[in-house]
Image (cartoon, grey):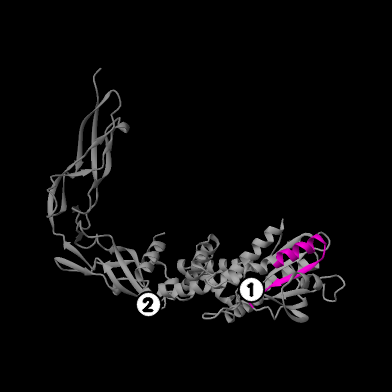
Amino acid sequence: MQTIVDTLYTFFQNIRFVDVLDIFIISSFLYIVLNLLRKSASRRSLFSLFLILVVYALARLTGMYLTELLIEGLFIIILIGFIVVFQSDIRRIIDSVGNWRFFTKSVPDSSDMETSVITEAVAKMADQRMGALIVLKGREDWDRHVHGGIELDGKITIPLLHSIFNTKAPGHDGAVLSDGQRILKFGVHLPLSTNLNKLSRGGTRHTAALGLSEKCDALVVVVSEERGAISIALNGQLKELESHSDLKKHLDDFWAKHYKTGSASIKQLGESRSMKTALAAGSLAFLLWLSFAYPSETVYRTYDIPIEYSNLESSDYALQDTVPLQARVTLTGSEQAFRNFDPSEVLISFDLTSEDTDDLTLDIDNDNLNLPSDLNLYAVDPATLNLRKRHFVATELPVKVPTTGTIADGFEVESIDPFPTFVTVLVDTAAASIDSVLTEPVDLNEIQEQAIQQIPLQLDGNTSRLPENSSPVINVTINVRKTQS
């Protein structure tokens, strides 16, 4: 957990303004792409790709080296699969970009008259159970998706539409293509959809309408010959309408979006669906940046590293109260070096056996850090450690034997005699004065007669210790006697 916290701390500390700008530009591009793919039949595959990027970014951040290698090894396969799955969508995006207009309108303005004419014509054909397929051009090119047909270039009128879809007319089974004001072609063949689960009770006309709506942003109006029902296909969705007024509303909305100047307003960006798309685009851009662009230079990461003082007891040094047992170390290196780095294996180590000065200052540097060769020490806090020399004086002190427990009934302790009664102890001159040396307590619960026990001396090691070759154990004689009843 500390490693993840340090990683995030380092990340936010080193992120640059150009990195934020980089993410913003990619987010804007992905927002446009995701808007075009939002109604795509392959959007579930896009979500799978998003999950792969999430796993890859987490692997890079947390050091899951094997997972990262696996995804990198499969990158070419994933890229080829992405192109195969999204080939039609990629082509549609390229066509859409080619159709962008910045200073001129891509389609003519229209008025309420055209929508009213189409609505009335469709309503009459529905009442007469006359099958019809009318396509209204959007902003995207449809030439690649439609085939055949007869050139007309006539104004949209009710009689013209009725004559085209009359069952005795040669082109009544095809579709009518309109740019909003005029009928361009009739008897046109449209691509058939493969998403049969969306068709419900629809037939070939409905399949063709749905197929074209999946390829471009055109609006397709369908009249069922069997049921007289009116449906529309838009953005890969097929919807059956309940009334003629519903058709008029959909046509007006389509006109307002595609044919009227200034229809792409900022208000559309505030819609919940657009905000979700923007959030998805920003998240995807951030994941792409983490996966492939971060970091582009040297990485800095900070860890809390423990300090080890070896041979401290055999030397004549003592730690001051202010000397820490760990240091905060900042390391530099490549991202690859940090992926193979385990901070739990790093230790700051000092060997004090050869030191022979009264006061000692220890510097933390690369010499006492067991770092890998591809990582370097950048900063450390604290940078130096101060130790002081201990001075020990041989002092002869009396031995005292504490007791614990209670002797058995009918007995009493006559005396407890240590041997030797005095021992020589090395005492630190800077420590508080010591007037005696204690042994470990004698347990009286087990004493019922005179006994001689070997009891260890109790010394704390920091302020006092025995000279070399001195025994830490003394003999203690416990004399008892029976009490008079």
Task: Tell me which amino acid carries mark 2.
Answer: Thr
Q: Is residue 64 left or right of residue 217?
A: left
Q: Along the polypeptide, which appears first: circle 1 or circle 2?
A: 1
Which residue bears the numbered disc 1? Answer: 138
Q: Which residue is mark 2?
A: 298
| Numbered-mark total | 2
Residue at the image position 79 percent from the left and 74 percent from the top = 174
Residue 109 sits in quarter: bottom right
Q: Is residue 126 magenta?
A: yes
Where is residue 202? Give x, y as percent: 78, 62
* Residue 59 in view of the camera: no
Q: Quadrant of residue 380?
A: bottom left
Magenta region: which residues? 117-140
Query: Of the residues shown, which amino acid type is indicated by label 1?
Result: Gly
Find residue 307 and report its horizontal and vertical position in percent: 29, 63
Mark 1 → mark 2, Cα distance in angstroms? 50 Å
Quadrant in which the N terminus is drawn? bottom left
On whether residue 143 falls in the magenta region, the answer is: no
Asked if residue 419 is positioned above or below residue 364 in the image, the reply reads above
Who's the residue at 28% across and 71% down the image?
Answer: 379
Under circle 2, the secondary element is loop
Q: Position of residue 345 (x, y in %)?
A: 39, 66
Q: Are marks 1 and 2 in contact (CB under 8 Å)?
A: no
Task: Please tell me which residue lies in front, 448 or 220.
Answer: 220
Secondary element type, mark 1 = loop
How dense is the environment of label 2, judged by Cα within 10 Å: few (below 14), some, or many (20 and up)? few
With respect to residue 316, does 107 lie above or below? Answer: below
